[in-house]
Amino acid sequence: MLRLIDNPPPWPNGARCAVCFAFDFDAESLLHLYYPDDSTRRISLSSSLRYGPRIAIPRLVHICRHFGIRQTVFVPGWCIETYPEAIELLVRDGHELAHHGWLHERPNQLSRADEERVLKKGMEAIEKATGKPPQGYRCPSGAYSEHTLDLLIENGFIYDASLGGDDVPYLVEGRAGRLVELPSDHSLDDWPQYVNMKEFNMAMTIQSPQRAMDVFRADFDAAWAHGGLWSSIWHPFVSGRLARADAMVGLIEHMQAKGDVWFATMAEIGDHIRDLVDRGEWAPRRERIPFWPEAVPQLARPSR
């Protein structure tokens, strides 16, 4: 067989690939971030977003318990404090809580000091809920700043899951050191498949769960064939809806039927990669951030 990944990592117990159904538990953080002046009047939007913690999280916990898997939930600190019952369900069943901002703020719109303040506030919420500091981070809206990596390293994070630079884990390096990057891709995000919400400027045609699973299954089958990492960017209020959750069950059954799949939390995957590197058993690709120290000058700009 023609292998399309030159240097796949050795996965535990000879697994063909690693899989994590990772969710972004945003709830109404998006509402209060984007509509701070009239959030209390947007009842319909709030209702749709709170479906995540009220209905979807218990459903997703039930699905994972049925299949005997533990997964990762990236959650803003405000959501942890606002929806403790949902958080307790996740923690009780051993799912990982990872950092996703305080109110889903975009780091590249903040000063370094404000980005660090938001980071620490979210860390405190996770540590209070779980008894330990977070190991991983996913940047809200993918708005990675030139300071994000160094702030993560300085604050003890083990992995990041914000970037899309490879099909397997790699190392990202900054001034403060390095950490493991667990990449994903927009094709593994439920947002372009299912979300049609004018409040978030998203007007894609909503796909059927079967059509969405075609996309997710194709990425999984390729990861399984070539030794890659399959890591989703899904949202409880989106993919936790009934028909979509039912289709998710079918996807997990497909993965389990293929066999030799390592279902793991992102923290477990990050620890595995770090151990391989430390023992000299695998050498991942490395990238230094930021990529460009300054903007590239343009010879010409569009006329107005």
Image (cartoon, rainbow, N blue to C red):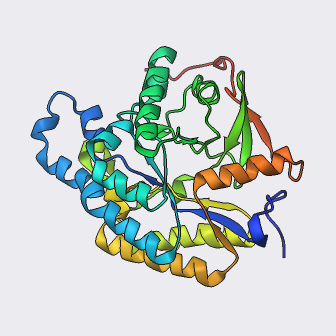
Residue at the left extreme?
41
Question: Is residue 193 found left or right of 108 in the rendered image?
Answer: left
Give the quadrant of the C terminus: top left
Name the residue rendered at 66%, 55% in the picture.
Answer: 269
Name the residue rendered at 46%, 38% in the picture.
Answer: 127
Name the residue rendered at 79%, 39% in the picture.
Answer: 286
Q: Position of residue 60 (x, y in %)?
A: 38, 66
In the rendered image, is residue 211 in sight? no
Looking at this view, is 203 or 284 the one in front?
284
Q: Position of residue 4 (x, y in %)?
A: 79, 64
Residue at the bottom extreme?
257
Question: Is residue 12 found left or right of 141 in the rendered image?
Answer: right
Tell me where residue 81 sits by quadrant.
top left
In the rendered image, is residue 190 in sight? yes
Name the residue rendered at 67%, 45% in the picture.
Answer: 165
Looking at this view, is 70 or 290 the one in front?
70
Q: Position of residue 236 (x, y in %)?
A: 36, 58
Residue at the front extreme?
131
Tell me where residue 155 sits by quadrant.
top right
